[in-house]
Amino acid sequence: MKNFVLALAIVTALASSSSGQAQPNKPTGDLSTIVMNAVSGGSAAGMAIELYEISLPLGKYELRFQIADYFRKQGVVVGDLPFLDFVPVRFSISDPAGHYHVPLICTPWAYTTYRGS
C-alpha cells in the first residue's frame, strides 16, 4: 500500500500522460473530494487528508480524513481521546477513465459520505 499525503482538498489520483493527451491503456480519470464542517456549516478548508493506493489503475483506495486534528485547530473541544480521530473511507475504482468524487460531511462525533458526481 502506498501513502500520498495531500495538501489540498482536491486530489488527482489517476493522471493522463505527461504530454497531457490520453494514450491507450493509460488511466485518464480523476478523483476529487471535499469536506464539509457540519459544526460551522462551511467547508473544512485545511483538513489533512491522506490517500492510500492499494492497487492502480483499477482497484481499491482509501482516503483518511484527519477529523480530530482539524477540529482542535478550529477550537472545538474533542478531548485527549477524541471519539473520531480520523475517518477512513475505502472505495474502489472500476473505470480508469471515470470521475470519482468522495465528499465527506463531518463533526467531531459523526460523519457521512457517498459517491458524488
Image (cartoon, helix red, strand yellow):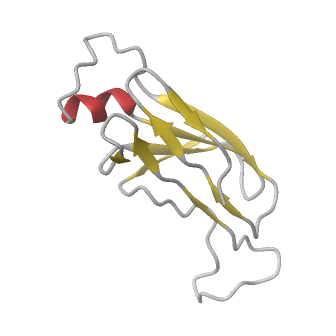
Quadrant of the drawing holding the N terminus: top right
State whether residue 30 is above or below residue 16: above
Residue sitting nearer the eye, 31 or 58: 31
Q: Residue 91 occupies which quadrant of the picture?
A: top right
At a point 57% along the width and 83% down the height, the residue shown is 18
Q: Quadrant of the C terminus?
A: bottom right
Residue placed at 77% from the left, 65% from the top? Answer: 96
Q: Nearer the viewer, residue 62 or 2?
A: 62
The residue positioned 50% from the left and 30% from the top of the image is: 87
Position of 46 compared to 97: left or right?
left
- x, y percentage for residue 37? 37, 40
Is the residue 84 above or below the residue 19 in the image? above
- The structure residue drawn at horizontal position 29% and vertical position 35%, both measured from the top left corner, is 70
Q: Residue furthest left?
A: 75
Rendered view: 99 above or below 44: below
Residue situated furthest front in the rendering: 41
Q: How many marks?
A: 0
Q: Can you give x and y, in whole percent of width and height, for residue 104 in the image?
A: 52, 42
Q: Nearer the viewer, residue 99 or 39?
A: 39
Which sits in the foreground, 66 or 104? 104
Point out residue 4 in the picture as x, y percentages from the top left corner. Answer: 48, 49
Tell me the quarter of the picture where residue 73 sits.
top left
